[in-house]
Image (spheres, rainbow, N blue to C red):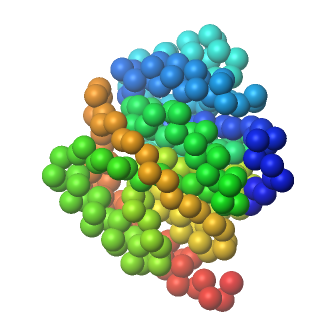
Amino acid sequence: MITPNRLENYKPTLSLIFPTFNEEANIATSVERAREVLRRHFDDFEIVIVDDGSSDRTPELADELAVKYAEVSVIHHDRNYKLGITLRTGFDAATKELVFYTDADLPIDFRDIPRGVELMVRDGADGVTGYRTDRGESWWRTIYSVVYNRLVNAVFGLAVRDVNFSYKLFTKKAIRKFNLTSEGSFIDAELLARAKLAGMRVVEMAVRYFPRRAGRSTLAKPGIILKILAEMSRFWWEEWRNRERR
């Protein structure tokens, strides 16, 4: 928990994690825009791109960005391991005090990152999770999101509006305690559930959402959904049901 005496004198360092898979149309713009904002608000930051076995030009473009900017680094997976493992790779590589992750398809205004840091510090929280004020999605994705949010909240006793939204900010100290195990897209829910298990405080923040303009999302594919449900069941069985013994 961050509790500086005076917010205006607190200058945290930040690691921004970009999990990427076939984002050649977005990665350069995402890094450029993020870097522009972070330079204005943080004295020390890094941008970690984790390429999850992309088959397009994402790896090449990411490497070019790392050569161009000292703050940018790239980790390449030898194949597509999916979101959970990709984020865990990025979290393990993070070196700064705060760790933030979002997708590389420009779903947020990067100016909402320092706004989240300010909220975290002001509220003495260990993390911030964003929720979309305007979903701007297809009816199918909207139904999927509503059902999934209600399911996760019911199973794990949470009260989160937008579990899977890719706006997650935590202290590195908190991330290191989580011992994350998810391989797929259950990773977002696992972050929140493990924070609750650890007695940590996570606050919500409204964030303007920008739908993907290029590339394709795979989140709502049947195989992805089944993997989420399988990982949720395993996490509940192995971790959550025994929480009172802890």
- Figure quadrant of the N terminus: bottom right
> Farthest residue in the left direction?
139
**Does residue 60 lie above or below 6 as drawn?**
above
Q: Can residue 73 be seen in this view?
A: no
Who is closer to the viewer here, 143 or 222?
A: 143
Q: Percent x, y for residue 44?
A: 75, 30
Looking at the picture, does residue 157 appear above or below residue 23?
below
The residue located at (57%, 54%) in the rendering is 128
Query: Front-most of 136 and 58?
Result: 136
Residue 228 in percent (x, y) is at 37, 61
Visible in this render: residue 114? yes
Could you tell whether 129 is left or right of 12 in the image?
A: left
Q: Which residue lies at the image location 69% right of the left edge and 45% below the top edge?
A: 98
Picture coordinates of residue 144, whole percent (x, y): 24, 59
Q: In the drawing, does residue 246 fall left or right of residue 79? A: right
Query: Against 15, is 219 above or below?
Result: below
For the C terminus, the image quarter is bottom right
Image location of residue 166, percent across then percent down:
45, 46
Q: Which residue is drawn at 64% across and 53% down?
A: 120
Image mark count: 0
Q: Quadrant of residue 34?
A: top right
Residue visible at 34% across and 72% down in the picture: 151
Residue 130's place in the image compared with 30, above or below, is below
Q: In which quarter of the image is residue 49?
A: top right
